Image (cartoon, rainbow, N blue to C red):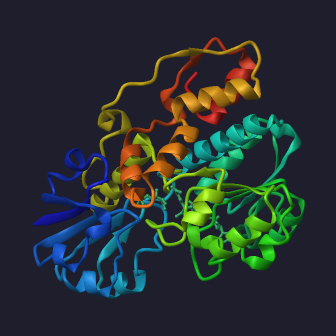
Amino acid sequence: MSIIADENMAALAPLFADYGDIKTFPGRDIDPHHVDDSTKVMLLRSVTKVDAALLDAAPNLEFIGTATIGTDHFDIPQIEERRVRWSNAPGCNAQGVGEYVLSSLLLLAQRSDEDLQTKTIGIVGLGNTGTAVARRLRALGYTIMCCDPPRQQRGDAGQWYSLEQIIAQCDVITLHVPLSSDTFYLLDNQRLSQLQANCWLINASRGEVIDNRALINYKQQQPTLRLVLDVWENEPTPMMELVALAEIATPHIAGYSVEGKIRGSQMLHQALYQGKQTTPTLAELIDVEPLPVVTAPAQLEQQWLAQICATVYDIAQEDLRFRSALPTGFDARRKANLARREFSAQRIIGAPAGMATTLSELGFTI
Ligand SMILES: NC(=O)c1ccc[n+]([C@@H]2O[C@H](COP(=O)([O-])OP(=O)(O)OC[C@H]3O[C@@H](n4cnc5c(N)ncnc54)[C@H](O)[C@@H]3O)[C@@H](O)[C@H]2O)c1
Ligand SMILES: O=C(O)[C@H](O)[C@H](O)COP(=O)(O)O
């Protein structure tokens, strides 16, 4: 029995070697030629297109998993029609995205010497990743406005705003919606033209949630717009003009972290075994050391926080490395990110009680 897996999956051997012979390939290359009637399991990430042709080439497939939240690369009706069990890994990388967004905001604020307390930050999509962002921003006392019409319609508690209100009132907008027919080009030409002139716009969801060509045109007319883009239309070949116009440009790694990748694999292990085998813990699977301990200052200042976030994961450096790797190095830069740690790997000692609570809410170990 064989398992076909994306080579960027974490903890493959400790979690899945008992189940079958594991063959790994670059995710973007996995196609009908890589599977056959011995393929029982596929463990994938967001870069493998799962369609009828791939499924037909693996007629004995029992389980197909993606160690990601996004499922826009899976043709779910085709999978279900063939009665193949499937799973994704909701929330596995939410911490990573929350930390990416906070770190990006701190970096932009540092560069223009602005106080994030003065900004109104709109979060569009309050699922796993948007909530991880909200939690961190709330912990710091920032003003946030949340937009999630499906949750609002379900009657979920909270103060909800429409996308139009977010666009009209927010200084910063960060997007965390799934890609669907409803969210394709959610920010189109018309909505982009309604953004505040000096808005900061962050996209760590899917590239197609913003009309990238319209964004290029709008940014050219509105140079004070500041862009943080982790996701792009047509990955792994983003529009180079847009990369040049983004202040922070990264290769779809907002959710990448050692911990997040292991969590994704653990979730697929649980889904595959359906409780028939105990899933090893994160502590059992992680084979890297924590970061050197840091002592907290007397007061939690924005500049110190920016510095400590960059110590854990330096987005400014990633941005530079990404630009110099393009036009061909999108996937190579993603792969190079496999050692990124989450804030939890950073222990901070000596923080007074109130600050310790805030740092802990941000994800640091106190
Ligand atoms: N860049 C990365 O590395 C990275 C990492 C994780 C997730 N993602 C992507 O980010 C997106 C969000 O991930 P998630 O884990 O938070 O997903 P999720 O499913 O947990 O949450 C999505 C939320 O968006 C809401 N939503 C749906 N349509 C909406 C709309 N039109 N307007 C506002 N809200 C809407 C849903 O109600 C839900 O609460 C997905 O596209 C996912 O693939 C990217
Ligand atoms: O949807 C997700 O969970 C993320 O976009 C995911 O982190 C992307 O990672 P990939 O599968 O492309 O390696």
- Tell me which corner region of the image, top left, top right, bottom left or bottom right, holds residue 329: bottom left
Q: Is residue 238 left or right of residue 5?
A: right
Residue 64 % position (x, y): 30, 70
Q: Determine whether 48 is above or below 81 in the image.
A: above
Q: Is residue 23 above or below residue 29?
A: above
In this rendering, position of residue 303 left or right of residue 229 = right
* 296 versus 269 height, above or below: above
Q: Is residue 155 visible?
A: no
Question: What residue is drawn where x is 45% and y is 23%?
Answer: 291
Q: Position of residue 279 (x, y in %)?
A: 30, 47
From where the camera sits, is residue 221 visible?
A: yes
Residue located 25% across and 67% down the image: 42
Locate the C terminus by quadrant. top right
Q: In this rendering, is residue 170 above or below 210? A: above
In percent of the image, x 23 and y 73: which residue is there?
62
Q: Quadrant of ligand 2?
A: bottom left
Q: Quadrant of the N terminus?
A: bottom left
Q: Is residue 327 left or right of residue 143?
A: left
Q: Position of residue 45 (x, y in %)?
A: 37, 62
